Image (spheres, rainbow, N blue to C red):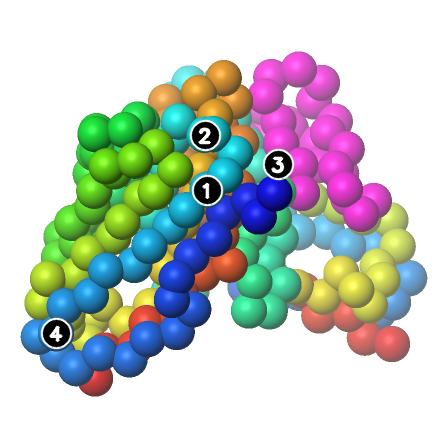
Amino acid sequence: AQSVTQLGSHVSVSEGALVLLRCNYSSSVPPYLFWYVQYPNQGLQLLLKYTSAATLVKGINGFEAEFKKSETSFHLTKPSAHMSDAAEYFCAVNYNNDMRFGAGTRLTVKP
Amino acid sequence: NAGVTQTPKFRVLKTGQSMTLLCAQDMNHEYMYWYRQDPGMGLRLIHYSVGEGTTAKGEVPDGYNVSRLKKQNFLLGLESAAPSQTSVYFCASSSRTRQNEQYFGPGTRLTVT
């Protein structure tokens, strides 16, 4: 069965610093990959998705992720963190309507 | 458009009680899902539906039942609640043509004492 591993349950960065949230997947077939963001007491919001087109995917709020098949990774990055980026981020893999989520990474942004 | 809505937002149950969570979507989506979210475990799929009148088990279906009598609604039932079902429950929906793109509701926080 496919699965997702997010390295680091908590990541803390300073405002203006690079954000890097790591995600590795295991899948026997080419997957669909997603990053979702969850703000406190809210549902999940889609940030971006990879669907086998371009390997570098741009999403909302300045985030992007790169699909690297050789590393089975789909890391999320943002060049400059903003205070409003503080939230929990989930990586997910979907094959044949079976969506599996990672455990989540909580991002803290320090002023 | 309201998107995906869930009722209630919060609920406290005693062990053995029953309840039904309601999910409604106004996007005419064919697919609907129920997840539970627990600390350190991400979201896990309980049940899903690919159309009116059809449901299927997900990763953690035990202790839950679902029904999809109308396209826009997806009900999640707990017949005899247990403390292990204390969680935050999320409903999601997606279209058949873009089934991988799921839209989530705001969640229901359930506590079973």
**Mark 4 — residue?**
B17
- Taking the image as shown, residue A45 lies to the left or right of residue B60, namely right
The Cα–Cα distance between marks 3 and 4, rounded to whole angstroms, is 42 Å
Classed neighbour count for the residue bearing mark 3: other residues with Cα under 10 Å, few (<14), some (14–19), many (≥20): many
- Residue A15: quadrant of the picture: bottom right
**Mark 1 — residue?**
B25
In the image, residue A9 sits, relative to residue B52, either above or below, namely: below
Which secondary structure, mark 2? Answer: loop
**Residue at the image point whose x is 9% and y is 67% from the top:** B80
- Residue B57: quadrant of the picture: top left
Q: Nearer the viewer, residue A81 or A5?
A: A81
State if disc 2 and disc 1 touch (CB < 8 Å).
yes
The Cα–Cα distance between marks 4 and 1, rounded to whole angstroms, is 27 Å
Q: Nearer the viewer, mark 3 or mark 2?
A: 2
Q: Which residues are magenta?
A: A47-72
**Mark 3 — residue?**
A74
Question: Are the residues under badges 3 and 4 in a single subunit?
Answer: no
